[in-house]
Amino acid sequence: MYLTSDTSVRHILIVEDSAFEQRMLVDLLSELPYRVSLAFNGEDGYREAIAQQPDLILLDVRMPSMDGFTCCRLLKANPLTQSIPIIFLSGADAMEDRVKGLSVGAADFVTKPFTPGALAARIHTHLLRNRS
């Protein structure tokens, strides 16, 4: 459905502490032409992003160890990861969280629950915008 003309498979890093949410996102993305890797908190997500250089990051806001806002700030401050688009995923629908997420450098902010088609479209759009 969202195949691009480029032949490489795009890599998405999911940073999410809930195993249920991870499984749901992996199931959604496995139906699309993406390679997926996982991190369970902001610290691991930051390290994985540096090591793997994904094409896009799906980042939860509330996690143990390091929250998504801090992780995003660090990723945007690092020259190795600053150009990677980040989409926040959050169960909180507070406007303050949306504003904070975008102000720390996220490309988008999606509230849970979300519709799979809408999330897939947002991922596709941000990958097209950030095509290398």
Image (cartoon, rainbow, N blue to C red):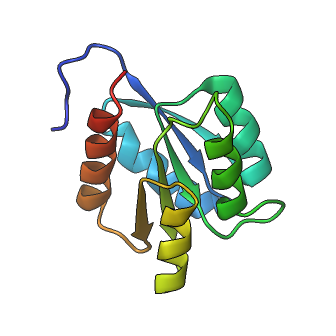
Residue 109, above or below 71: below
Residue 40 in view (yes/no): no
Q: Which of the pair 10/130 is nearer the observer?
A: 130
Residue at the right extreme?
Answer: 65
Residue at the top extreme?
Answer: 7
Residue 56, above or below 41: above
Residue displayed at 60% across by 33% down: 81
Q: Where is residue 73 in the image (x, y as percent from the top left)?
A: 66, 53
Q: Which of the pair 8/33 is nearer the observer?
A: 8
Q: Quadrant of the N terminus?
A: top left
Residue 26, above or below 50: below
Q: Which of the pair 94/26 is nearer the observer?
A: 94
Residue at the bottom extreme?
Answer: 94
Residue 84 in view (yes/no): yes
Q: Quadrant of the C terminus?
A: top left
User: Is 125 left, or right, of 10 in this rendering?
Assistant: left
Residue displayed at 42% across by 47% down: 27
User: Is 74 left, or right, of 61 in this rendering?
Assistant: right
Q: Where is residue 39 in the image (x, y as percent from the top left)?
A: 68, 45
Residue 93, above or below 74: below
Q: Quadrant of residue 130?
A: top left
Residue displayed at 73% across by 53% down: 42
Q: Where is residue 52 in the image (x, y as percent from the top left)?
A: 63, 25
Q: Position of residue 61 (x, y in %)?
A: 61, 67
